[in-house]
Image (cartoon, grey):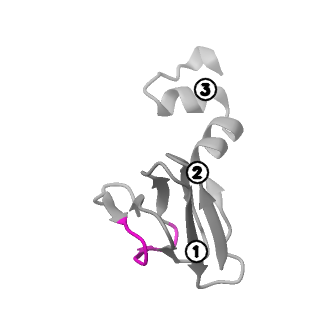
Amino acid sequence: MAFGFLGPCGLNLPHTHPRATEINFSIDGTLRAGYFQENGAKFVMTEVRPNQATVFPIGSIHFQQNIGCKPVKFVAAFNHEDPGVLTIANSFFGQFPDDIVQASLGGELSAEEF
């Protein structure tokens, strides 16, 4: 389990847990939460009010956002002792070669670039 805090309008960036499903329980504020599991899957979004929970399936890309003006506390519970975490933007923009990122965002790869 993990105890989390999000400041006013704070965002827990899109990320995934490759080894665990997450149950996210809001203690004292409202979170906007969303996820999708795989290419072509329907995006699921919900509001998690105080004393409510939502589930993020194993490997799903998901986020939580505090939509209020006061800090929010939440608890995240996992079904694996080491759920792992991969923050999508940091990994994508920080680790992939520039030409691959450019092509992924609509640019073109050409033989001259290699």
Look at 57% across and 66% down and name the residue there. Answer: 73
Label total for image: 3
Q: Amino acid at mark 1?
A: Val
Q: Nearer the viewer, residue 56 or 11?
A: 11
Label 2: which secondary element: loop
What secondary structure is marked by label 1? strand
Mark 3 neighbour class, 10 Å CA radius: few under 14, some 14 to 19, many 20 or more: some
Q: Which residue corresponds to mark 3?
A: 99
Question: Is 49 contained in the magenta span?
Answer: yes
Q: Is residue 88 above or below residue 35?
A: above
Question: Residue tagged by mark 2?
Answer: 7
Q: Residue furthest front?
A: 70
Amino acid type of disc 2? Gly
Q: Residue at the spot x=68%, y=68% of the render?
A: 84
User: Quarter-wise, where is residue 100 in the image?
Assistant: top right
Q: Please, is residue 16 above or below residue 70 in the view?
A: below
Q: CA distance from mark 1 to mark 3?
A: 39 Å
Residue in the picture at 59% in, 42% down = 89
The x and y percentages for residue 102 are 54, 26
Magenta span: 48-59
Residue to which mark 1 is pinned: 75
Is 62 or 38 nearer to us in this picture?
62
**Left or right of 85 on screen, residue 36:** left
Farthest residue in the top direction?
Answer: 112
Q: Secondary structure at mark 3?
A: helix
